[in-house]
Image: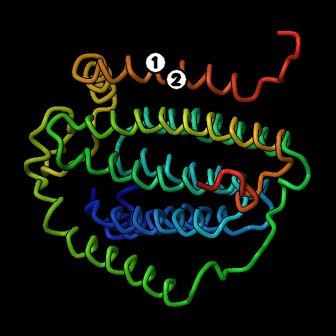
Amino acid sequence: MSFDGSIFVIVALIMFLIGFIGFIKSQSAIRMLIAVEIMINSANINFAVFALYNDTSFVTGHVAVLISIALAAAEAAIGLGLILSIYRSHGTVDATDFVEFKG
Amino acid sequence: MAFLFPTELFEALDYLVLILLIGYTLGSALLAVSVKSIYHAVLWLIFSLLGVAMMFLFYAESSFLLVVQIIVYAGGITVLMLFAISLSGKEAMFEKSKGWKLMDWRLNLAGGFILFSIAVYIITQVSSTFWSITEEELSTRPGTVVNEAGNIVSFDEAEMIQRLASELFTVHGGTVILLGLLLLATMLGSVYLVKKEVEDL
């Protein structure tokens, strides 16, 4: 505990930007999911580290991280199921080729 | 061995470990979104997730979150991704590179400026807002282990896991039930999405 946790805000910010830029610039749908996982993890770092400082029972942030991990698992399962289903019908996983889903 | 070395050395090592861990996590994340092969991207994602798990252990004092992160993320989701890549053919393994030019350069500039402003705002808000609790206040809470000099040594792991369990099933009990329903719906939905079309049914 020789340093405060404020450096983790900056770490999480950089990690979120890495995920965000990766999400924007990627063409593959699987890599988009990877970028989303990175963004979710950057938020989890903040929840877990802040829980030590601003929470009287220390653990509410940890509960939030557990819920977020379960949500991320559900999101990955559904996302990969969608990608496999689209691959079967269209023969591609390239998100820029999914032109039929345009609104 | 601790009396042989000055305490400043240990503090410097603390900082060194922090910087190495941050570099490991952010470097792996950067490689995960930039390498050409999607297989390698998933492998770099595993390293980035392990770095986040180490942050949970060292700086959030929670070995339980470390275990959950390794089992669910590094062990579960990444294997799911590797299977999805294997099942979706050869062209899924490499990304077609179409260059960085996504839109007009003026829009790029405006987007970059907005991102930069958000980053500067967050960094300037960090110091005053979040760290309102001093170490003295922290050391008087239950679960904190303090030595004779009054410095915080560690947090009682067993007590924290016990408190996490009791809070998870009392205060946040409804959320746990909702999560169970969500995971059930996810399981059924993904089975419905990927099942083969059977003509006879």
Q: Position of residue B61 (x, y in %)?
A: 35, 43
Q: Which residue is mark 1?
A: B181
Question: The disc numbered 1 marks a residue on which chain?
Answer: B
Whether residue A84 is situated above or below residue A3 in the rendered picture: above
Q: Residue at x 37, y 79 (%)?
A: B114
Q: Which residue is mark 2?
A: B183
Residue with the most extreme front position = A103
Mark 1 packing: few (<14 Cα in 10 Å), some, or many (20+)?
few
Question: Is residue B47 something one can see in this rendering?
Answer: no
Residue B168 sits in which quadrant?
A: top left
Instruction: Mark yes or no: residue B78 visible.
Output: yes
At 32% across and 50% down in the image, what residue appears? A49
| Left or right: B133 as drawn, with respect to B116 | left
Q: Tell me which corner region of the image, top left, top right, bottom left or bottom right, holds residue B73.
A: top right
Task: Check disc 1 and give the amino acid type.
Answer: Leu
Please, is residue A10 above or below residue A61 in the view? below
Q: Judging from the image, what secondary structure is the residue with disc 1 in?
A: helix
In this rendering, position of residue B79 left or right of residue A68: right
Question: Which residue is found at the position 21% from the left and 33% from the top?
Answer: B143
Examine the rendered structure and indicate whether residue B159 appears above or below residue B122.
Answer: above
Please identify the quadrant where the C terminus of chain B is shown: top right
Amino acid type at circle 2 is Leu
Say which chain tag 2 marks.
B
In the image, residue B191 above or below residue B102: above
Quick check: do tags 1 and 2 share a chain? yes
Question: How many numbered markers are drawn?
Answer: 2
In x, y percent, where is residue A91? 86, 47
Do residues under tags 1 and 2 come within 8 Å of each other at their CB atoms?
A: yes
Q: Which mark is residue A96?
A: none
Residue B117 x %, y %: 32, 80
Relative side of B180 to A101, left or right: left
